[in-house]
Amino acid sequence: MSIEIQHINKQFGDFTALSDVSVTIPSGELVALLGPSGCGKTTLLRIIAGLETADNGRILFNGEDTTASHVRERRVGFVFQHYALFRHMTVFDNVAFGLNVRPKSTRPSKGEIREKVMKLLSLVQLDAMAGRYPSQLSGGQRQRIALARALAVEPQVLLLDEPFGALDAQVRAELRRWLRRLHDEIHVTSVFVTHDQEEALEVSDRIVVMNKGRIEQAGTPDQVYEHPANPFVINFLGNVNLFHGRLSQQDAEQHGPVEDAVSYVRSHDIEIDRKQQDSTSLRAEITNIQKLGPTVRVTLAIAGNSKCVEAELTRDLFQNLGLQSGEAVFVRPRQVRVFVEDYQI
Amino acid sequence: MQFFKRHNNVLPGFGPTLGFTVFYLSLIVLIPLSALVFRTMGLTWGEFLATVTAPRVMASYKVTFGAAIIAAVINAVFGVLVAWVLVRYRFPGRRFIDALVDLPFALPTAVAGITLATIYSPNGWVGRYLEPLGIKVAFTPLGIVLAMTFIGLPFVVRTVQPVVEEIEVELEEAATCLGANRWQTLKLVIFPMLLPSILTGFALSFARAVGEYGSLIFIAGNMPMVSEITPLLIITKLEQFDYQGATAIACVMLLASFSMLLIINLLQKWSRRYAE
């Protein structure tokens, strides 16, 4: 079931939540809506679900206009950040809810419901918990039950609103890998909202980067990471250093006659060396060293530049170089992306 | 052997605080109530039974407990409605109405009784329109129900209100996404969550109504066998210096109220079985 989002606008009072958003979500893919908080990603998700109505624009499911249809008729599975489980019902009754509320004519028999619920519970690996209440489960387990409950009604699309947002780091990492595997198994078109770039890069087939109610870039994780469309995207996906400067003759041909330009270099694309390699090497002094598990973050002050630069090295490389704080070294950007200055960050 | 295991707690002095609590409760609640029972012991079992099962007394139980249950049911229904409207909707005058709910708490009950009796009497503001329809409110059991409803309303509203505030909109959205209509969402999701607080409000409202005296004597009409409430009967006995008779009836009321509250508490516990 593909989803087409066409020219959606949404205004909350004076605040523009979404302005002219158009994007197509291909059938069977797992798509991440990525952006900082307040960028409109949750609003877009709620509009797809029908929980919110757009001021104008259309939402098509498989080419069919659903803009006017009620949430109940859209057959969407929605997973909330804080689970929204019915706490007075057992896990079993929570998952069975969507089947039990069907009108008599289309409701499966008690036996069929039981069979289906137990199948879903084993899919989310919680079949032993059927008789428990949500308050007796951990956060990760609750979110899996919420997912099973959403899947019970055989939704055309699955929408997840920051599904791992309320969980601690380890459970979150575990659960998103599990979600990826689950999606490979059931292939229902899924959209999930996240502000965590790592999560988006790891889990999704396609990333839609949003900012201030607009879509900045949409593409596969590789496209978005390797070929960011603009400074916002490169800035949002990973740590990045800025170098202000003028365009060389060669770059100016590419970008037109603009004077100011900003180069963006990712932290892990900065090489540190004791010798000067070539003309792109810059003299710098190490001001701070932070060890972050497998990587080491080195902060450097570039000679003749007030701004600091951060470089990320692997622990191995760091130990081979034997860098010390206060040492004078040379830095060389391995890969540079240049954007002309029309964009304030 | 130590009777109480020592726990390290931020609040100091488990011993003194427990001691004070027991002492305080004894002084305020337990000693007066036991005095009631001791006084009644002056009667023989036969006398006791004869006093508490006299036809006039039996009729008064029926009026008091019957009217209290009806009033508590009315409050449980409309109190929930009021709480819901106050929490879920924004309208001009909401804060004023919110404050109005507490009025029956604060108003002297005699004032309430006289006011209700006046406006519902056959020539009162409201009563004169009910009279031609054959509905008599003041000086009948209906008046008792009315006054009991009035004094019990805040109990339901104030116990249900915070629970309505706590219900996340997400739960309703989740139910809708799963295909439930408004009625199913109300019946299967919202009502079960409100039930424990409705039961608490019901119990409080009921207990208050059973014990009410001040407002009722003005509106009840106090006709023996028809609209005479048990507390009034107790006062009558006291005025006749029949102290033992008065305490005997009081004991029965105490027992009845206590067992009803106990049953409601058990019901409430059952309705909250999911909360660990």
Image (spheres, grey):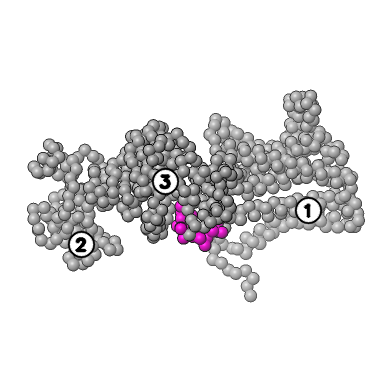
Vertical placement of residue A106 versus A282, above or below: above
Q: CA distance from mark 1 to mark 3?
A: 59 Å
Q: Quadrant of residue A319?
A: bottom left
Which quadrant is home to the N terminus of chain B?
bottom right
Report the disc number at residue A157.
3
Q: CA distance from mark 3 to mark 2?
A: 53 Å
Residue type at numbered disc 2: Ser
Report the disc number at residue A98.
none
Left or right, residue A76 beside residue A274: right
Which is more toward the observer, B159 or B195?
B195
Residue farthest to the bottom, as pictured: B1
Residue type at numbered disc 3: Val
How many C-alpha atoms fall within 10 Å of the one at disc 3: few (<14), some, or many (≥20)?
many
Instruction: Name the spot of residue B115 as percent of width and height, x first.
Output: 74, 31
Label 3: element kind:
strand
Instruction: Name the spot of residue B159 as percent of width and height, x first.
Output: 62, 45
Report the disc number at residue A325.
2
How many C-alpha atoms fall within 10 Å of the one at disc 1: few (<14), some, or many (≥20)?
few
How many C-alpha atoms fall within 10 Å of the one at disc 2: few (<14), some, or many (≥20)?
few
Instruction: Name the spot of residue A317 as percent of width and height, x first.
Output: 20, 64
Give the residue drawn at x 56%, y 47%. A107
Report the disc number at residue B255.
1
Which quadrant is home to the C terminus of chain B?
bottom right
Which is more toward the observer, B210 or B238?
B210
Chain holding disc 1:
B
> What span is in magenta?
A123-147
Instruction: Name the spot of residue B119 as percent of width and height, x first.
Output: 74, 28
